[in-house]
Amino acid sequence: MAAPRSFSAAEVRDRCARGECLVRCRRRLYDLSAFVRLHPGGERLLRSRAGTDVSAALDGPPHRHSANARRWLEQYYVGELRDEQSCPKAEKPSDAAAPRLDPRCKPVDVDTDLVDWRKPLLWQVGYLGEKYDEWVHQPVDRPIRLFHSDFVEALSKTAWYVVFLVWTPVVLYLSWVSYTALARGDTRLFSSFTTEYSIPVHKYYFPFIFLLGMFLWSLLEYLIHRFVFHMKPPASNYYLITLHFLLHGQHHKSPFDSSRLVFPPVPASLVIAFFYGVLRLLLPEVLGLSIFVGGLCGYVVYDMMHYYLHYGSPKEGTYLYGLKAYHVKHHFEHQKSGFGISTRFWDHPFRTLIPEETFEKED
């Protein structure tokens, strides 16, 4: 293995002055320029640490970084800071003097990983068995390919704005259809059971029914994320492991793959049609459609927000700033809690709220 590159303090200062974001942990240097916008603490915080030793900051407060976060950091390792006081400039640091890295924090080596990253992953992960759960929760910063077919692979990837462009017109059109249908005045609740005590549903109720649909979506978002996306597939079942990776495991393995952060419209259409059919069976047509369109709007808001929580830079102290930090904790440390994405509301009654970090005060 080649010896790590050696940097002088002057080199580090010059690169930071040019806008690069180099930080160090003792003598290990990391170039975070590509990650700086994605940092959950905000770009400004990370840039303020450029050129400095972040060893103490990794242990907090305000946040104690997990083993996954430290492993993530190692992906940006570029070399060692030269100790110019104890060795000449041309001398490279010896292996004995090099800082030791905690084995838990070593980065995933894609060349020796449990899967072959040069091939589609979907058909490989099922063979991981008992190793799958640990492997899938060790995130990496690299794109994922799922399928051999270029066409199917393209259908599995989506730019964030496609979701907005596809579903917003549908929401607007169905909202108009629902409102005009309610305006006819012939929609009544419980009319299939009794005409005498049925309740008329006026057009003025539409905004409230729409909001009810959005509220019900937030519950559905939580339930799907917790009980479907975070099911632990049996180690002996190749097909359930493969299904889990297809539905959500891929996102935890590569949380910043920008093409896989929102739900592709083609498979989404099938799921959306299923829920529309359920509402049609349970409720009068117009009432079911009104709730459905509110839920569909909630889904669009959720998908846009999910993308922003990964790639946006919300202002410190805002609701979205706290939500971004909360969601990143779910990815890197608390995979068995923090299932709310667009809101933390349902984590409270279901007791899956990510606990606040505490730090002992120094005497």
Image (cartoon, helix red, strand yellow):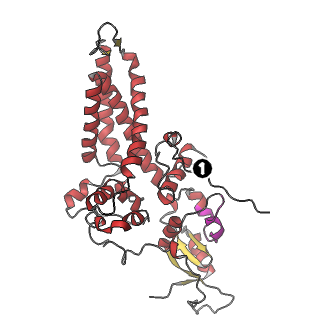
Residue 347 vertical placement versus 356 (above, below): above
Residue at 43% x, 48% y: name it: 306
Residue picked out by circle 1: 316
Q: Is 95 inside the magenta-drawn segment?
A: no
Q: Secondary structure at mark 1?
A: loop
Closer-to-camera residue (69/171): 69
Closer-to-camera residue (350/40): 350
Is residue 254 visible in this depiction of the protein?
Answer: no
Residue at 47% x, 50% y: name it: 309
Q: Quadrant of residue 17?
A: bottom right
Q: Is 57 inside the magenta-drawn segment?
A: yes
Closer-to-camera residue (254/282): 282
Residue 223 vertical placement versus 238 (above, below): above
Residue at 35% x, 55% y: name it: 260
Within 10 Å of the Cα at label 1, are there few (<14), some (14-19), or many (20+) other Cα atoms? some
Q: Amino acid at mark 1?
A: Glu
Residue 167 vertical placement versus 107 (above, below): above
Q: Quadrant of residue 224?
A: top left
Q: Which residues are magenta?
A: 46-61
Quadrant where the N terminus is found in the figure: bottom left
